[in-house]
Image: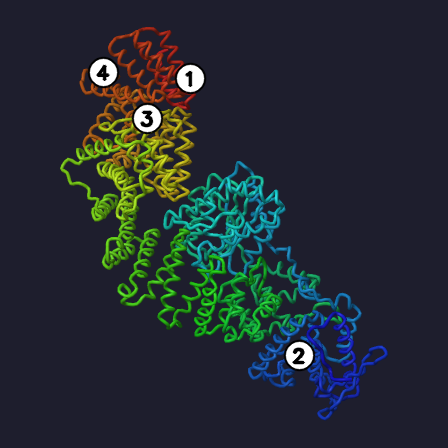
Amino acid sequence: SGNVTGDNTMSKFDFENAVILAKEITKAFGKIHDLGVVHNNVTTENIIVNTSEDDGSFSIKVIDLGLATFLNEHNSGVGSREKDLLSLGEVFLELFSGEARYESNSFGSAEADCKTWNGKQPNQSSQHAVSNRRSLLSNDRHLLHMSKVPACISSLILNLNSGRNQYRLAREIEEDLSTILANRDTSLCNVVEEKKIRSFNFQLGKIYGRDEHISAILDAYKRISKPENPSEIVTVSGYSGAGKSALVQQAQKHIIELGGHFLSGKYDNFRQMEPLSAIIVAFTDYCQKIVTRSAEKLHQIRTSIKETVGPELAVLANASPSICQCFDVPSMKITDVGLKGYHRIKFAFRLFVRAISSSDQPLVLFLDDLQWADPLSLDLIESLTTDSENKSLLFIGSYRDNEINEMHQLTVQLNSIKSNNVSINEIKVGNLSKEYINELISDAIQTSPRLTHSLTNAVYRKTSGNIFFVLEFLKSICNEGFLYFSLKSNQWEWNIPLIESKNTATNAIDLMLHKMKQFPKDVQSALKLFSCLGTDCEECILSLITSGDGIDEFGCTDMMSSLEFSIEEGLLDYSDSSYKFVHDQIQIAAYSLIPETDKGKLHLWIGNQVWANYSALPENAIFVAAGQLNKGKMFITEAHQITELIRLNLQAGEKSMSLGAFTPALFYLKEGLSLLGSNSWEEQYDLHLRLCESYAEAKYCAGEFEEMHKIVDEILANAKCLDDKLGAYFTLVTSLNAQGKTRESIKVGLYVLSSLGEPMPAHLDMEAAGIIELKKTKHILEEKTDDEILKLRAMENNYKMAAMRFMYGLTLSTMLVRRVVNVWLITRMVQISISCGLCKESAFAFAAFGSLMATVDINFDVISASRMGKLSLRLLEILQAEEYSAGIHFAVYFFIQTRVDHFRKSLQPLKQAYNVGLRFGEMHYAVVAIRQFCLISFHSGENLMIVLEKIQYYGVKMKEHKQEIFWKMTLPFKKAIHHLLGQPNESDKPFWEGADEEQLLKYARKSNMVLLRIIYYVRAWIAYMFRDYKLASRMVEEERQYITDGCCYLAPNFLKPISLFVAGLISFELLHETDDVKWMEIAEASMKEMETCAAHAPSNYKHKLLLLQAESAFLSGEDNDAARLYDSAIKIAEDNGFIQDQALAYERAGVFHLKQGNTVRASHYYGQAHNAYLKLGAEKKASHLRLQCPF
């Protein structure tokens, strides 16, 4: 025999015996009540249990009746029995859990508590007792949960302890205990992962009132599954708690069934300064999933991705270390930061998404809470959704539309995406109607919807149909006993007066806050600590916190158990080695539990725990540590700790810059600068300098030029030597160029070069000086063999290396506006390489010098140019200078190779230069290479529709990459094609008319001589093609005037021979009508240029030379020679695929024979010209020829 007791490790059999014992105890008190007596002191000490040795049955003896009273005969006796029944709940709690109720807390008497649950609104005097009772119930739930007490028993005990009058007599308790025993096989099981018996039966696979929205998402998915359709976007907007995420998650099941990939991530208000946080989660999850595939499938996926993404996997690995593990990518330091890093990571993600998506298995990327996305994420979303080479992506983004406005970055980005003709399907999610709420409640409590209207009306009045609020409110009224499952009636019952009287919070956050305040103190402490990390946290980071020294100071005695309790209560989830709040409103509520004065202390402690163990954590933990410590910095007092935090912010800023995430970088770097002392330039010079250098570059990358200038000025004013100023100067030069202040950029760059010992010579005749440098450099190179150049030592002089870097940075801008400076830069780069040794920029220098020798008259030497091109390609490999390959390929294959080989052989290398430039963030050279790719396609005889498609496609890319200047330099060719094709709005007006074109011409005359030459050349050519010789001659004259007055003859110019060819044709035509000597001079210069070009690249220029010679013979009356030369020009143009020149030669031959009176031959040539123009795609020109034909 003994007192009632229990332990917290009961098995199913132990629970069964405990239920039998509880039933016998209840029966004993029922007999006492039947005798008209209330015990008034029901405790475990006053219940003696005897166990039969024969059959194990129990007999009960109740003692200590000293406080007993008799029932009053004037009432039912129910109210008087309640105290005994309430105390029985405490007895059963100790029986099943093995622990007594929390006795240390003073919660008032059971009698007082009973009086507060009378079905009426509690008055002010009883509010404290009600609050205490709820806190006790929360503790009870925690204790029962930890003891793994079956749900039905827990419900019975909590009902007793609540004092809510569900049980009015002891025999009612006895009946429910008998029911439990009768169904012991199911009632006494306790499988945590399964639904609780008689708990809410929420339909996990069912979404209420959202069928239309789900259909819209699935329709978009089906559209992008078709190869001919482009990628699309679906936005899901609405208030917090409206069910946006649940809607997409429901659609996810159908998408996976249809064979699609589905990746998802969620942004966090507390982690907005962590670059790409949600995107990294999404792609990390993908990597973790594919490694579980079969060995054969995994090998297939890895091979496909490696082939598509190639070396850029290292860039992705820098952002997401799981890439290293999944694809065996060696961890490596990414040196490209700032804008180069920004462009590289966008390009790398594009390649990765292309690799894992196809029309057979489209990719759906869902990112939640976009209102908190960092700017880089939004830029990346735009980059992925506007990628015209990937048509198998459906992007779904959800956001709270009440938390953004027209100026919000998300709105701006979505408008930008729309402007790129990407379809955006907008779904707005509102509150549910009362009809759907009733359906949800009916399903949840498995009760006919006809019977739940009263409950639904009460719930709807309190929640207005916000789904998250509805679900939490239902849990709340269940926990408080207003909604409960009756074992007696075996159905759910509810008390409308109590529900209506419930002093409900006006929103879900306040409701959750009220709920958490009822939890045991250690659970509250765990939730507060966890909320400091945001909505989710990796288990590896959380484990550091739970085992960290000093956690007891924050009231967390067993954090992991408390988190398990929170999962059971529906506040947290655990999946994929991470804990997370079920909803961010729960996190907000938990965080609001922390007093403002304590938040900094908690953040500081967490930050110290993470940073102390950083080496054992994922790389992104640096952002967690920095974020936590910055929030607790006000409590740091030690100078060395402040310095460490400054360094941590610097590391976080530099890491952000390596990802191209400028907003987070600015945040961390600014935090670091704010912690520096007033004398930091003296006391912490190196740290202050490094912070300022990174901060200036981040400001430049973010386009905040005014602030950048202030930082640069501060560096230049405080730097101790030139070495320490170089970083600031480089940022300044680059930013001035980005702002369009090209000449100012060149001025600063030349000043820095002078400081580095490389002053540009000051000559009155700079062109003459340039010629001298060209000849000097050429002579130096002629004295060196290829082997001698390739075996030159590595450059060691830091100033010379810095000079080479600045010179390389200035070459493109000087090529456009200051050609003399461009020549000096290139020649000096070669001279420095020969005299001081090789560096990576040397490979570019040789290619650039080769381009000068291939295109500049005064230095024309195609053989030497070809040698320089080959040397630069060898050096590119030897010096491992792949990041410079875009510029090198541009120089070699556009300026040099086109002078020695067929134009078309340069197309693929130029396209490769574009892709490599994207890889390494060399956007200028990438775009200029693809622009020249379009230009050569135009001149190489391709069908005009194909060329137009290329120009339009890559024109979008140029604008995407913010390289408008090169798009402007492509526009004249686009305009010319439209005119030749005779497309709508182009065929009815002369080519040279139009406001946009005049504005372009005005801009070119002022700022861009290269563009000006292009405009005059294209206008002259089109005018000649349509026999407007007056306009054609005017274009030639104006070009000569502007080029002579404003453009250096040192300019490397691919178009020069082609432009002279057209000018020669125009001149010969005019010479039939005039004796003006200038046209003869132009004609002779044209033939001389073609002779030179044809000698080295006959496939490109021989037919052009023959056509000019035919025109010359035609003019001179040498008819037999003219006829022969026209036929030769036609034949060679055809052999080399220059159909546009073949068509023109046919036409000119027709004109010649018509003049001779041979209408038969003239008709033949006109017919052949007409067919050739149609084959070219020049339908308007073909029509024009037909109208001009006299036959």
Labels 1 and 2 touching (C-beta < 8 A): no
Kindly report the distance in space between the C-alpha atoms of the residues bearing marks 3 and 2: 93 Å
Q: In the picture shown, does residue 1153 fall above or below 330?
A: above
Residue under pointer 3: 899
Counting residues from the start of the chain, the first of labels 1 and 4 encountered is 4
* 535 vs 849: above or below: below
Q: CA distance from mark 1 to mark 2?
A: 99 Å
Ranked by sequence position, the earlier of labels 4 and 3 is 3
Question: Nearer the N terminus, badge 4 or badge 2?
Answer: 2
Residue 934 image position (x, y, % from top left): 38, 32
Q: Which residue is more in the foreground, 101 or 509?
A: 101
Residue 496 vertical placement versus 437 (above, below): below
Q: Dot 1 corresponds to which residue?
A: 1171
Q: How is the image coloured?
A: rainbow
441 horizontally vs 949: left or right? right
Q: Quadrant of the N terminus?
A: bottom right
Query: Badge 3, how many Cα within 10 Å: few under 14, some, many 20+?
Result: many
From the top left corner, tell me how far across and down residue 862 is, in percent: 29, 26
Residue at label 4? 1071
Q: Relative to residue 961, is residue 367 depicted above or below? A: below
Which residue sits at x=40%, y=46%? 343
